[in-house]
Amino acid sequence: MATQSPFSFLDSIFDRVTSGPQPPQWLVHEVHQRAVLFINHVLMQEPEAMERMRRQKGRVALVQWRAYSMALLVTPAGLFNVAPEGVSPDLRLEVTELSPLALAQSALRGDKPAIRIEGDVQLAAEINWLVDHVRWDVEEDLARLMGDAPAHQVAQVARRAAQALRQFVGARMPTGSVVPAPVTSTDRTAA
């Protein structure tokens, strides 16, 4: 017998908030620009990641979750840029889990979300490599701002807090609940 999460009301609140007025286009554009800046900052810390993406220059990947989407264009430098409006994507990545709470729980467990993949197989493989191998070195960025010792202490506290949060979420999972494995399918589109 499946037990409903005591936090399921958060999903209904999220649904009500997102079905209301949509944010203005300028705000969506700014959020996309900031996300691209962050992604590129992380990629620049890993030269192999940039080299892999250089081979995919000019390709467009569309990432979508619910009504939210973002099209990313791979630049000749091996970084990303927001794709021009109306461009046809070479790859579509759609997060199939609709519940933000379930996504947060799986992220805290360290699981990848279930994704439906359509399009270019090689671009999908490179993006999967990025997800598996590229990590943001928060401690290094903090060290630039506050020095090595304080950055190390802050990072240690953050790791302990994250571990405690993972344990809390793990303890709150209903007994006998089965976590579905990510569902992925790769289809090559006609060129």
Image (spheres, rainbow, N blue to C red):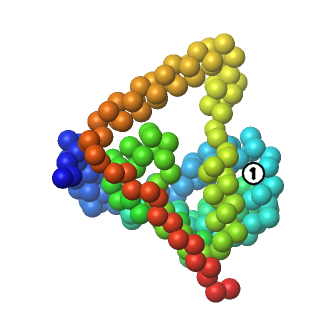
The residue located at (45%, 40%) in the rendering is 109
Residue sitting at the far bottom: 190
171 to 38, vertically: above or below? above
Name of the residue lying farthest toward the top? 149
Q: Residue at x 67, y 55 (%)?
A: 129
Residue at numbered disc 1 = 49
> Where's the C terminus, which quadrant?
bottom right
Task: Say which element carries label 1.
Answer: helix
* Picture layout, residue 9 above or below residue 166: below
- Near-viewer residue (78 or 30): 78
Q: Is residue 188 visible?
A: yes
Q: Position of residue 148 (x, y in %)?
A: 69, 17
Above or below for 96 versus 176: below
Percent position of residue 121, x then y: 66, 71
Q: Give the crowd class for mark 1: few <14, some 14-19, many >=20 residues within 10 Å.
A: many
Residue 176, horizontal then vertical, whole percent: 28, 46
- How many numbered callouts? 1
Regarding residue 81, the answer to whether it shows in the image is no
| Viewer-proximal residue among 63 and 95 | 95
- Tell me which residue sits at (61%, 67%) in the image: 61
Q: Nearer the viewer, residue 129 or 141?
A: 129
Please name the residue shown 80% across and 64% down the image.
Answer: 55
Give above or below for 157 relative to 26: above
Of 74 and 37, nearer the camera is 74
Q: Is residue 20 left or right of residue 37?
A: left
Q: Position of residue 9 (x, y in %)?
A: 20, 47
Q: Is residue 183 left or right of residue 12?
A: right
Q: Amino acid at mark 1?
A: Ala
